[in-house]
Image (tube, grey):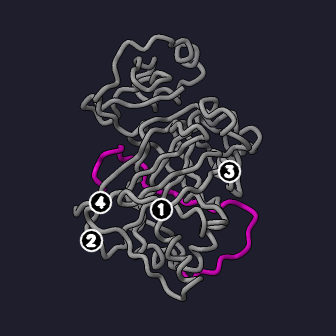
Amino acid sequence: MRLATIDNGTRDGRLIVVSPQGDAFAYAPAATLQALVEGWEALAPALLAIADFPEALGEAKLLAPLPRAWQWLDGSAFQSHGDLMDAVLGITKPKTDVPLMYQGMSDTFMATGTEARFPSTDLGIDFEGEFGVIVDAVPMGTSAAEALKHIRLIVQINDWSLRTLAGPEMKTGFGWVGAKPACAMAPFAVTPDELGDAWKDGRVCLDLLVDWNDKRFGAANGHAMGFGFHELVAHAARTRDLVAGTVIGSGTVSNANFREIGSSCIAERRGIEVLDEGEPKTAFMAFGDTVRMEAVDASGRAPFGVLHQRVVRA
């Protein structure tokens, strides 16, 4: 099942269920996605019973599936990306067997087609393609095995980053604020069963195709996560209850063969250049640049739809 949110003039929009063909919809039994995940058990029968899609999707304006969330926790579950970022930032992290995670800005998730506004290109504007999950209420201390049943929806995210600010903020020991503005979400949130065999071991086993200014930049696969989403959820819930609607990200999708398949962010490309050529050569984004992200299966189907944005001056 694929869910989307139509712009109806309110902050949270109106939740809809999208037809399998992607050309029609029915109104969901909850007004918003937040209301749906808060009442999932009670609302699921009515949701699953929807078989008729009387409304044409057409030119309907879609918001992010979850336009704002109570909590956004982003992991860094791809080892090849983490190693490259440490090299770029000059950081040596202590060895650990638990996931890396930070708490980011959650009051806005931008929609596909919206302009990404930034004050200056001197900030090192960068896209980051990743996957995420939306959970229902997760009790503190939930195990990784139990966490799987709390994953209700899966989303595709562009986690915008301002790299000039990232290193200095990291080195304070407090973490990111200025370096992490609002993220964007692809138009469709999907239930795990919608992905079929591409949902495996708590991982999204799809190629994430990233195009920068209409040129292919990367095609990494999500199966390479060092920790599955169930393990990220359990890590986040170790010392806190997770409210329904919490979004948890995978971190930048990255594969060890990044030299052959490309990257999901510019900083990773720059890290490769540092390793191979001694210095970074690829510039970050300029005003007017575009980025397009689309996760596809073996047949070319894109379950999350297309996430595309243009960078503009704020």
Q: Give the distance between the C-alpha atoms of the residues marked 4 and 2, in whole angstroms.
A: 10 Å
Position above or below: 12 against 166: above
| Lateral position of residue 127 relative to residue 122, left or right | right
**N-term mark: 1 or 4:** 1
Q: Residues within 10 Å of mark 2 (few under 14, many from 20)?
A: some
For the stretch drawn in magenta, the main secondary structure is loop
Q: Residues within 10 Å of mark 3 (few under 14, many from 20)?
A: many
Tell whether position 303 is magenta: no
**Sequence-wise first label, 2 or 1:** 2
> Closer to the observer: label 4 or label 2?
4
Q: Which residues are magenta?
A: 89-116
Examine the image and state in which quarter residue 75 appears: bottom right
Determine the CA span between mark 2 and mark 1. Answer: 23 Å
Q: Position of residue 250 (x, y in %)?
A: 59, 53
Residue 239 appears in view: no
Going from N to C along the chain, the mark reached first, 3 or 2, is 2
Query: Callout 1 environment at 10 Å: few (<14), some (14 to 19), or many (20+)?
Result: many
Front residue of 189/207: it is 207
Which amino acid type is shown beneath numbered disc 3? His
Please tell me whether mark 2 or mark 1 is closer to you in this view: 1
**Whether residue 240 can be seen here:** yes
* Secondary structure found at label 2: loop
The reply to whether discs 1 and 4 touch (Cβ–Cβ < 8 Å) is no
Circle 4 residue: 311
Picture disc at residue 217:
1
Query: Where is 25 relative to 313, above or below?
Result: above
Residue visible at 38% across and 31% down in the picture: 5
Identify the residue shown where x is 55% and y is 11%.
Answer: 49
**Residue occupied by mark 2:** 120
Residue type marked 2: Ser
**How many marks do you count on the picture?**
4
